[in-house]
Amino acid sequence: MCRETSWKLVVLREEVKKDEEENSSNNEKIEPEFKGRVSLLEPDVSKKNCSIIINDLRESDSGSYQLRVNVLNQKPTVTVPPLIEGHQTTLTCTAPGLCSGSVPEITWTWRKPGENDSHIPGNITVFSTETLTAVTQRHSSTLTFNTSTEHHSTEVTCKVNFNGSKTITETVTLNVTYVKNLNISGPTTVKPGDTLNLTCSVDSFPASSMTWTKSGCNESLNKNNESEPLTQGGQAFLIIHNMTADHSGQYICTAKHQIQTLTKHTHVTVTSPPKILNGSGCVNQSQVLTCVCISQGVPLPTITWPLLNIKYSVFTTGSQHTVNSSLTVPLTTSSRTTIECVSSNKHGETKENLTIRNDLKQKDAGYYTFTSLFIKCQQYIIKILIVTLLSGAIICFARERYRNKQMSSGNLTEKMEMVTTQAVPLVDAGHEEEDDGTQYEEAAEAATQSTPDGHIET
């Protein structure tokens, strides 16, 4: 029996003419006395039958015959299972040939692109021999290691050496399945009319499926007419021309891979200088001047009220892009007919003189009245809280003093009645409190009384 289909008989054989023409470089000289009389019993050597037939036997044919086989260009077989990052894997190298004989030596080497051969760190190699029949064996070696991205696109070589004379090799390229490092690059703050150009990249093998979406919208921007996303080489490009304030928001890049799905968010801001909106103005009502200034911009502007030499209060609220500032000031005899509102952010500043009006339309008057009432309610509530806290503190203090004197005088009933009846009442919720500080003085005076012995009780 011979080892493999590629092994050929080279001694004591009769080659057909076609084989001689095709494999003349591999044939040895056939002795003349055997020409035409020696042939293979089975011409198809892939059937692994190397028996010969000698026709017209002669006396000179007596003697010993030797069969020699030669391995021609056959390489070891390297089996590589699917490789996944972080998983242990085992490669198998099988030496060619099935005949019995000396055991070959099998070694493994590993090479990064542009580097020399080296051994895979942390590897385990195991040599094994499998007996197939009484005269045939299969020799193999396994290489076990933990797979990482470091092994991707590297080469592993199996070397098989027979009796130290002939060495055959087989080299395979490793492809490791992995995905990591999803990144978004590009400026996320743009001006109106500019072009947004973001790049989302992911390091993975095989290539990931990548899409862009905007938060709150499930539709992929890969199909949006106003954008031009492209995907190539592990990158997805999001390009939006003529950016407006509506394009501001959160954008999401998603990379779908056979191992897992990765997402990354980025917030896009379309900047704009501030502008003062319609609806801003001033109204004179009941000797109180109320002004409202509404401004819009990105980032959110700040509003100031310059050139006012009198004391005033300001109430400001803001949303994502709009700020609303309300000013309340007592009306004076000043001849001022306008109030200046200044709105600014880092991209610019705008000013507007708001005209003071006495004859507002109903819808405008209602707005200013509501703003004025809101501010007054805030002031009223604060006054109530201050008076209540002060009254409570004074009452507690008076009670403590009373207890101390009761221990010495024993007249508990009379003094408890005095402190209780003189407690300061809460402000009447049905009347607006004037901001002149009289309630605080009355509360303090009510809690200060003379004792029967002529001493002042506080």
Image: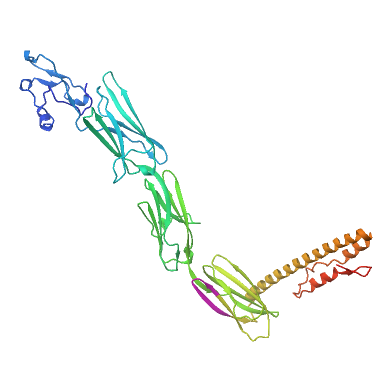
Residue drawn at (63%, 73%) of the image: 326
Quarter that holds the C terminus: bottom right
Residue drawn at (54%, 78%) of the image: 351
Q: Is residue 275 above or below residue 247?
A: below
Residue 35: x, y in percent? 7, 22
Left or right of 63: which side holds 412?
Answer: right
Q: Is residue 345 magenta?
A: yes
Q: Nearer the viewer, residue 243 or 147?
A: 147
Q: Nearer the viewer, residue 205 or 90?
A: 90
Outermost residue toward the bottom? Answer: 335
> How would you classify the magenta stretch by its main secondary structure?
strand
Residue 230: x, y in percent? 37, 56
Outermost residue toward the left? Answer: 32
Could you say which quadrant of the image residue 156 lies in?
Answer: top left
Q: Is residue 108 above or below residue 256?
A: above
Residue drawn at (75%, 67%) of the image: 386
Could you say which quadrant of the image residue 169 lies in?
Answer: top left
Residue 54: x, y in percent? 11, 17
Q: Is residue 395 above or below residue 136?
A: below
Colouring mode (rainbow / by chain / secondary structure / one colour): rainbow
Quarter that holds the N terminus: top left
How many numbered circles are shown? 0
Q: Is residue 398 magenta?
A: no
Q: Nearer the viewer, residue 432 or 35?
A: 35
Left or right of 198: which side holds 72?
Answer: left
Left or right of 9: which side holds 408?
Answer: right
Magenta range is 343-353
Could you say which quadrant of the image residue 375 lies in?
Answer: bottom right
Q: Is residue 44 above or below residue 86?
A: above
